[in-house]
């Protein structure tokens, strides 16, 4: 589990295609001695398993593998050397839950409809896949590209979030533009509530 609080922006340094699997090497500031083989790291919202780790110039370089299902429902198939990705280590018992509970299982891609830089803050509007929009509520939480964000307003399949300067500086959101697709994970609580109210 994760919280959607980004702890580093990693950089993809190598991509290796092997049959239907993509092996991605990502450089991060993390101490390589603290990353175990088999550990989960949230990479742009995707929970991926570490299969190799080594010391890098300023931290660690860890390898993860994206399987066909992951490649089919995410942007990971488009990542190249130089791509920046939001990173978060797995939640440990006793850690502060600063965002909301995030599983790292991507539900779909949300399209950025617009970006409005308002001075101190930036408003992004998104269009969610229709089958996911009912899980998104005003003042609720969503995880977008691994970042826990609060929903300001909802209008059909469209919703918006307001980002503060700190978020833009310490995540990949400063680079994001209208027309791009971002990984969307709806709130876990909303998912279970919807399931409970379905007729049996």
Image: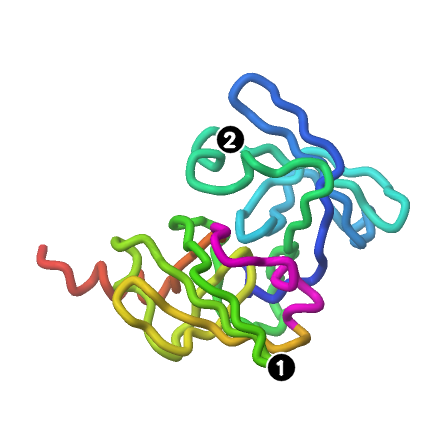
The extreme top residue here reads 19
The residue closer to the viewer here, 26 or 119, is 119
For image coordinates 73% across by 42% down, the residue present is 82
Q: Is residue 127 magenta?
A: no
For image coordinates 88% across by 50% down, the residue present is 58
Q: Is residue 4 left or right of residue 125?
A: right
**How far across and down, in percent of the image, does residue 8 sit?**
72, 59
Quarter of the picture containing the C terminus is bottom left
Report the label total: 2
From what the image shows, is residue 96 above or below residue 182?
below
For image coordinates 65% across by 63% down, the residue present is 174
The extreme right residue here reads 57
Q: Secondary structure at mark 2?
A: loop
**How far across and down, in percent of the image, does residue 22 sit?**
59, 28
Q: Quadrant of residue 80?
A: top right
Q: Is residue 171 magenta?
A: yes
From what the image shows, is residue 165 above or below residue 110?
below
Q: In the image, which disc is placed on residue 65?
A: none
For image coordinates 41% across by 78% down, the residue present is 152
How many residues crowd around disc 2 within 10 Å: few (fewer than 14), some, or many (20 or more)? some
Q: Is residue 125 left or right of residue 133?
A: right
Q: Which residue is mark 2?
A: 67
Q: Which residues are magenta?
A: 167-181
**How far across and down, in percent of the image, does residue 60 sit?**
81, 46
The residue closer to the viewer here, 77 or 155, is 155
Q: Which residue is mark 1?
A: 119
Q: Earlier in the sequence, mark 1 or mark 2?
A: 2
């Amino acid at each position: 589990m994760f919280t959607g609080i980004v702890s580093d922006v990693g950089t993809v340094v190598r991509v290796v295609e092997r049959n239907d699997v993509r092996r991605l090497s990502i450089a991060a500031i993390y101490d390589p001695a603290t990353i175990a083989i088999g550990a989960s790291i949230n990479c742009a919202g995707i929970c991926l398993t570490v299969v190799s780790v080594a010391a890098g110039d300023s931290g660690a370089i860890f390898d993860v593998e994206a399987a066909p299902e992951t490649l089919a429902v995410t942007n990971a198939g488009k990542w190249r050397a130089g791509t920046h990705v939001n990173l978060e280590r797995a939640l440990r018992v006793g850690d502060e839950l600063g965002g909301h509970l995030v599983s790292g299982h991507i539900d779909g891609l949300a399209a950025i409809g617009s970006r409005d830089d308002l001075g101190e803050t930036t408003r992004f509007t998104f269009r969610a896949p229709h089958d996911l929009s009912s899980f998104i509520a005003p003042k609720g939480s969503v995880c977008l590209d691994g970042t826990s964000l609060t929903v300001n307003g909802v209008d059909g399949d469209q919703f918006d979030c307001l980002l503060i300067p700190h978020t833009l500086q310490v995540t990949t959101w400063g680079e994001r533009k209208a027309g791009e697709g971002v990984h969307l994970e709806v709130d876990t609580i909303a998912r279970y509530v919807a399931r409970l109210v379905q007729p049996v």
